[in-house]
Image (cartoon, helix red, strand yellow):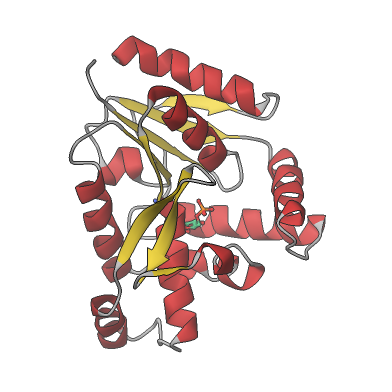
Amino acid sequence: MKKIIIALDGHAGCGKSTTAKAVAKSLNYVFIDTGAMYRAVTYYFLENEVDFADPTEVKKALNEISLKFVFNPEKGLGEIHLNNKNVEPFIRNMDITSRVSDVAAIKEVRVFCVREQQKMGEDKGIVMDGRDIGTVVFPTAELKVFMTADVKVRAKRRLKEMESKGVNTNLSDVIADIENRDHLDSTRKESPLKKADDAVVVDTSGLTIQEQVDSILKLAKKKL
Ligand code: C5P
């Protein structure tokens, strides 16, 4: 069967990764969570006290970074490894979440991550979620979806997910973080978050995860 690229972009916390993971599983495709890459770079910068504002320091740091997804058979998904260390457990907390959009706005960081993402999609058969997949990483992707949802719905879902992972936070902090990231991501100079002209909009406010997955699988099957 023909293999395609599915680009899943959209606002923070509208279930992109969960949906992308399930769509990939159903089609037997590779799932790539590009947010994890920007989070891993942010983790490295904070751990190594890299001055984000200094392009020389940023370039030097990026030269020291290797990122790859390593499949975890127990979890049934790829986990992000930074310089051969699994950093999944360290990249979802509020320290990283509140800084990641600043790091993701840096041109050199985007060039670095986009190059890696394009290599990962060379053989197609991939579901990639992020902010600029349909506009910059794979502008010729066969299926582009732009996901969005009401901010309160997104925050409640995100809070539940974070609580289940033992992350200590509350609803108003999660709303503030989501609004702040959406604003930074949509207004940045480099590859701002925006809907690709040919993307299909899916509003997930009233949908269950299964309904989100089904709607995207339906769109994908038309392209196979
Ligand atoms: O998807 P997730 O919420 O984990 O993404 C974290 C952050 O990484 C986003 O808020 C955004 O700043 C950045 N990002 C990006 N481009 C992508 C994926 C994520 O700028 N393709």
Q: Position of residue 31 (x, y in %)?
A: 40, 40
Q: In this view, does 113 lie to the left or right of 194?
A: left
Most foreground residue, 24 or 5: 24
Examine the rendered structure and indicate whether residue 201 appears above or below residue 174.
above
Q: Is residue 51 left or right of residue 213?
A: left
Q: Which residue is drawn at 19% across and 36% down?
A: 123
Q: In this view, does 72 lie to the left or right of 124?
A: right
Examine the rendered structure and indicate whether residue 112 appears above or below residue 197.
below
Whether residue 187 is visible here, answered yes or no, is no
Q: Residue at x 72, y 43 (%)?
A: 157
Q: Position of residue 64 (x, y in %)?
A: 27, 80
Picture quadrant where residue 197 is located: top left
Whether residue 74 is visible here, answered yes or no, is yes
Q: Position of residue 2 (x, y in %)?
A: 22, 18
For the N terminus, which image quadrant?
top left
Q: Which residue is drawn at 52% across and 62% down?
A: 88
Most foreground residue, 45 or 10: 45
Examine the rendered structure and indicate whether residue 1 appears above or below residue 195.
above
Picture quadrant where residue 62 is located: bottom left
For the image shown, how many numbered marks are present on the structure? 0
User: Quick one: which residue is furthest to the front in this view?
Assistant: 74
Q: Is residue 79 left or right of residue 171?
A: left
Q: Residue at x 30, y 41 (%)?
A: 135
For the C terminus, which image quadrant?
top left
Q: Where is residue 111 in the image (x, y as percent from the top left)?
A: 24, 62
